[in-house]
Image (tube, helix red, strand yellow):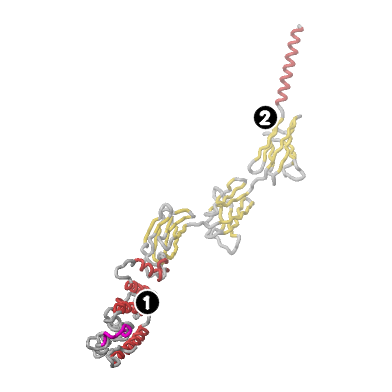
Amino acid sequence: MSKRTTAVLLIAVVALGAMAGVAAADGHLEVGVDKDADGTSTVTVTENDSAVENATVNVSVVDAENESYAGAGEYETDANGTVDLEAPAEDVTVEVTAASGNDTVTETADLEAPDGLELDVENTDGEPVVTVTDDDTAVENASVNVTTTDENVTYVGAGNYETDENGTVTLDAPEEDVTIDVTAEYENDSVTETADLEAPEGLAVDVENTSGEPVVTVTDDGEAAENASVNVTTADGQNVTYVGAGDYETGENGTVTLEAAEENVTVDVTAEYENDTVTETVDLTVGETDEADEDESFGQLMQDFIDRLQDREGGIGAAVSDFATENNPGNAPDHAGSPGGPDDAGNGSDAGNASDGPGNAPDHAGNGNGSEQGPPDHAGPNGDDGDDANESDDDNRGPPSDVGPNGDDGDETEEDDADDAEADESDEEEEADEDDDDDADAEDSDDDDAGNNPGNGNGQGNGPQN
């Protein structure tokens, strides 16, 4: 054999050896841990993706001082190259070592305790729903018991139930807030949960603006109830009617606006919605009146009236007097004087020109018309010796100049009469009569002196002595 042939053969042998080494390297041992929902685990040993039967599997706890695991120990793979491990009682970390032939491989795995039997209570503000699971799987035909935590409180949903195929039980909505204990039992396992149940708001009716146009609002579980039926009637025992009584239907906001009451009345407002009914009794009142006019003082009312009479022709006395009599809270007596002046006191009446008040001469006072009373014909400035009288004597001749309708001051007497009448309006009638009598007596005395003292007999014609 030539040297060249020998060399080629050696190269081929080396190449085959290298290929065999690669194959050996590719065929190393592998181990895997698969965890199931029930807490159990499966260990699988393979070599070149093929199951290794009779491989040795050793399981140990990583933190042996603080954790324990009942499934720790040594196992041997079956024909499928697998080993089943039990579920841990609590979460634990383990090392799994597989050995086959001269190969060894180790894997670390976290094993979780199964969830086991569990229950949950949801929708606690309406109809509560209890759900029972075992290892996160719905449990059918599990037993469920519901009781109240306070024996003095009742709950219509208390009792015993059995879960359906979905592992659920639907309870009744509570009529009031309540706390319950829910216990589920399944395959010798049990679990208990405490839940707070809240009574749902349900159908509710509210009435606002009861002193104006009332607004009725209907809600269901706090939401506006559109198209709810509303009936308004007068409550029993009422002797009045209400114009807004009748049937209504709520709008999209769940509201109805009623008519304002014409008089105070109590009404029943009943709302119906989705087979549920609720009634509310409310008092409707007539809107309050404006108290500003009622609180305005009489003085202010009088001032406003006078302001409206400014520049009135003929004066405002009579109108003001009438207004005061009609509106004064005290209602002045009929005999009180009128602020309207002489006209209001009676022109031509006993209180007028015929009044006995001061400033008016009595009917018997001398007037030069032949009356038996008064000074003699020769007295005064027209007597025989009238030319000899001086100015000072004139002051004493005849009756006083302010006596009688023909006196020098007659015009002033009429003005005085008006002033006196206005002054007398605030006096009582008895006081006015007394003053008038006194004045009349004084005038009569003066007239008597004038008639009975014609002079001194010397032809001077001196008037009455004052």
Q: Look at the picture and state if 119 lies above or below 364.
A: above
> Horizontal and vertical percent for residue 45?
69, 33
Q: Which residues are magenta?
A: 385-394
Label number found at residue 331? 1
> Horizontal and vertical percent for residue 325?
35, 75
Name the quarter where the C terminus is drawn: bottom left
The residue furthest left is 370
> Horizontal and vertical percent for residue 360?
30, 83
Name the quarter where the N terminus is drawn: top right
Residue type at numbered disc 2: Ser
Secondary structure under the numbered disc 1 in the rendered image: loop
The residue positioned 58% from the left and 54% from the top of the image is 144
Left or right placement of residue 87 versus residue 339 in this view: right
Left or right placement of residue 62 versus residue 156 in this view: right
Query: Which residue is denoted by mark 2 in the rendering?
Result: 50
> Is residue 379 magenta-colored?
no
Q: Look at the picture and state if 37 lies above or below 147.
A: above
Inspect this view and state whether residue 363 appears: no
Residue type at numbered disc 1: Asn
> Is residue 390 magenta-colored?
yes
Quadrant housing residue 389: bottom left
Please tell me whether the stretch drawn in magenta is mainly helix, strand or loop: helix
Left or right placement of residue 240 versus residue 222 in this view: left
